[in-house]
Amino acid sequence: MLKVNEYFDGNVKSIGFEQNGEQSTVGVMAAGEYLFNTGAPERMTVIKGSLTILLAGASDWQTYGQGEAFEVPGHSSFSLKVSTPSAYLCEFLN
Amino acid sequence: MLKVNEYFDGNVKSIGFEQNGEQSTVGVMAAGEYLFNTGAPERMTVIKGSLTILLAGASDWQTYGQGEAFEVPGHSSFSLKVSTPSAYLCEFLN
């Protein structure tokens, strides 16, 4: 029911859950650099800390702090730089 | 570094992390009723969904929705009623 996922040798961990048929995860990223691929489009909201991201095809890195959100298209990717362990909510959009 | 915890037969799962010496967890609670004991005082913020809580010694249940927070004293307890899977941030206060 609550599904724990681990990525990048355990440097990113998340817990997946469902509300009214909508899939979301909350997770934490340790400091590091990551590349994620998307299936469904998703909205990422920073819960604590900050995430610096580069969307596929974009030329500028952007930093999002606590309470800020960004969306990632489906079947795309984004790069992340994380300077301090940071928590996020990822909501899959349909 | 990122520590996964499970409670209540896996109906509550959390990921613990540290920022600048401050301990926090993000987690998800499946629908159900729970009783948690506190060590350190903590601040709970609802990330998605809602939590209905009764602090030890209080007489009224209170419901907190997305973005709302409540604090729990140290060495105390609180009861929770959760009607839909809900995500939270728990920050331990020193």
Image (spheres, coloured by chain):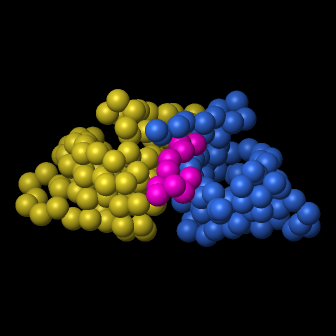
Chain colours: A blue, B yellow
User: Which of the 4 image quarters holds residue B52?
Assistant: bottom left
Q: Out of A50 and A42, give the one closest to the viewer.
A: A42
- Which residue is drawn at the image coordinates 46% and 58% (left, top)? A20
- Which residue is drawn at the image coordinates 50% and 47% (left, top)? A17
Q: In the rendered structure, which segment of residues is drawn in magenta? A: A14-23
Does residue A21 belong to the magenta stretch? yes
Does any portion of residue A35 appear in the rendered image?
Answer: yes
Please provide percent x and percent y for residue B32: 28, 45
Q: Is residue A21 left or right of residue B56?
A: right
Q: Is residue B73 left or right of residue B23?
A: left
Does residue B35 belong to the magenta stretch? no
Please provide percent x and percent y for residue A13: 60, 39
Q: Is residue B53 left or right of residue B5?
A: left
- Which residue is drawn at the image coordinates 38% and 45% (left, top)? B30
Q: Out of A47 and B50, give the one closest to the viewer.
A: B50
- Which residue is drawn at the image coordinates 65% and 62% (left, top)? A94
Q: Is residue B44 above or below residue A59?
A: above
Please provide percent x and percent y for residue B45: 39, 60
